[in-house]
């Protein structure tokens, strides 16, 4: 399982783990040293005291007088000096002995078959040992807290240039042609190398965006002339009284396709120029007027397919209607109506105006749930076997909405069909 901590959190965790390892090793060393001192030094002291008592055993004025905190026993000793049963199993050497609530250090010697045992109360030593362990534990906790604090401070200092670089890269102005390079603001270190890489990448991206805008602008501009020729030819043909009904219908269809292509070309031109032109210079129009134009344009094709076109303008107050970019609003609403016509074989198509947008609903085949999130991507279609479209209409709608700060969402209709909701924002 991959943990998704930020780099700053990883630095803090690394400091904490390193501190825990070092402080833990230090604490274990102290504990091991304490036990070593206990075994070596105390056993040496007890051994010396026991040897002193054994030497006293060999003189005539012998008297067993251990230290006040010591107990002395030996085999066959008079009264309380005799070795108790709980100590008779001890082997020669140093031991720790627990007798009820008390604990002792014990030194055992066997001389000429006689067992000598010297006990020393270790209560004071254990108290000092507990204090030492408490100090070690507090030191470990403080070291860990200090490591976390130092890790946090270091993470902020280390990550500061990275965060600043990320903010600069995310800034939209960095894609402008006159945007200053990033690398001169950073030292010749790893962050500086990253800034150099971003400069190179952003440079290529700026060039690609410039080429795309120029291509879109040039192609759209050059298409205007042949479209005007087609439209003029259709107008002349429609004025010819010799055309029969079938031919006139085909010419009208061509004329309508030319009008749609002209609108599409104008939309592409607007998208290509939107980064360079003042938005206040583009023509503005109200939501209801665009809706009425498109309803008049699409009513014939929709009803000729046997569908019902419902137009609900009541929610839009025309007297205080907000104005929007005429080309983009016409393109978004027109593409959604065309998409509804394309995927609806029976039933209805409804255009509902709202105070801040509009709805386009249909009773068509609908869009599978697994494809809904991808429907606004280029070349994605709801039904791959249906019609001749390339799946660019909804992608264009999404691009326009993102450009204008609008939002478009897709939801299913019951029992079948789609509902597209567009929320507009005046600019």
Image (cartoon, rainbow, N blue to C red):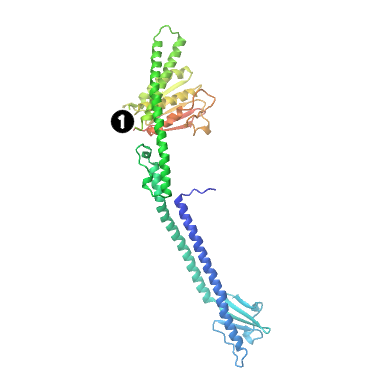
Q: Is residue 187 above or below residue 248?
A: below
For label 1, count other residues whose C-alpha is less than 10 Å away and answer few (under 14), some (14-19) or many (20+).
few
Q: Determine which quarter of the picture holds residue 119.
A: bottom right
Can you say which quadrant of the picture contains the C terminus?
top left
Which residue is labeled 1 in the image? 280
Q: Is residue 38 above or below residue 380?
A: below
Q: Nearer the viewer, residue 117 or 301?
A: 117
Q: 167 left or right of 96?
A: left
Seen as rendered, the residue at the extreme right is 113
Q: Nearer the viewer, residue 68 or 225?
A: 225
Q: Nearer the viewer, residue 283 or 126?
A: 283
Q: Position of residue 246 (x, y in %)?
A: 47, 11
Q: Residue at x 51, y 66 (%)?
A: 27
Q: Position of residue 395 (x, y in %)?
A: 45, 30
Q: Determine which quarter of the picture holds residue 406.
A: top left
Q: Please give the count of numbered marks on the rendered protein.
A: 1
Q: Residue at x 51, y 49 (%)?
A: 3
Seen as rendered, the residue at the extreme bottom is 60
Residue 352 visible, this angle: no
Q: 90 left or right of 11?
A: right
Q: Position of residue 421 (x, y in %)?
A: 43, 31
Badge 1 marks a residue whose secondary structure is: helix
Residue 3 visible, this angle: yes
Q: Is residue 35 above or below residue 83?
A: above
Q: Position of residue 107 (x, y in %)?
A: 60, 79
């Amino acid at each position: 399982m991959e943990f998704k901590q930020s780099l700053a959190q990883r630095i803090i965790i690394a400091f904490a783990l390193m501190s825990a390892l070092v402080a833990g090793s230090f604490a274990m060393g102290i504990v091991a040293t304490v036990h070593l001192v206990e075994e070596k030094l105390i056993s040496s002291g007890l051994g010396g005291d026991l040897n002193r008592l054994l030497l006293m055993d060999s003189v005539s004025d012998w008297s067993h007088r251990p230290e006040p905190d010591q107990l002395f026993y030996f085999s066959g000793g008079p009264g309380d000096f005799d070795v108790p049963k709980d100590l008779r199993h001890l082997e020669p050497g140093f031991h720790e002995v627990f007798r009820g609530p008390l604990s002792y250090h014990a030194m055992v010697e066997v001389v000429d078959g006689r067992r000598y045992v010297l006990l020393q109360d270790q209560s004071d030593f254990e108290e000092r040992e507990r204090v030492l362990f408490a100090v070690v534990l507090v030191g470990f906790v403080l070291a860990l807290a200090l490591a976390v604090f130092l890790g946090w401070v270091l993470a902020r200092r280390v990550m500061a240039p990275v965060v600043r670089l990320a903010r600069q890269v995310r800034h939209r102005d960095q894609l402008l042609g006159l945007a200053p390079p990033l690398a001169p603001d950073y030292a010749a270190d790893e962050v500086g190398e990253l800034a150099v890489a971003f400069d190179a990448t952003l440079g290529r991206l700026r060039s690609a965006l410039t080429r795309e805008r120029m291509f879109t602008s040039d192609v759209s501009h050059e298409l205007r002339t042949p479209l005007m020729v087609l439209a003029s030819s259709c107008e002349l043909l429609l004025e010819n009284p010799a055309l029969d009904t079938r031919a006139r219908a085909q010419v009208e269809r061509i004329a309508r396709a030319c009008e749609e292509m002209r609108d599409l070309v104008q939309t592409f031109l607007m998208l290509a120029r939107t980064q360079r032109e003042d938005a206040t210079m583009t023509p503005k129009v109200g939501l209801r007027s665009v809706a009425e134009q498109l309803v008049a344009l699409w009513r014939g094709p929709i009803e000729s397919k046997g569908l019902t076109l419902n137009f609900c303008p009541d929610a839009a107050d025309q007297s205080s209607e907000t104005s929007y970019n005429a080309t983009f609003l016409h393109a978004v609403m027109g593409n959604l109506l065309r998409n509804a016509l394309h995927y609806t074989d029976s039933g209805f198509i409804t255009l509902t105006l709202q105070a801040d947008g509009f709805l386009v609903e249909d009773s068509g085949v609908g869009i599978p749930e697994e494809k809904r999130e991808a429907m606004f991507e280029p070349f994605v279609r709801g039904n791959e076997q249906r019609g001749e479209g390339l799946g660019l209409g909804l992608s264009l709608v999404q691009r326009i909405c993102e450009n204008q700060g609008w939002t478009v969402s897709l939801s299913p209709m019951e029992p079948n069909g789609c509902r597209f909701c567009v929320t507009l924002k005046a600019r």
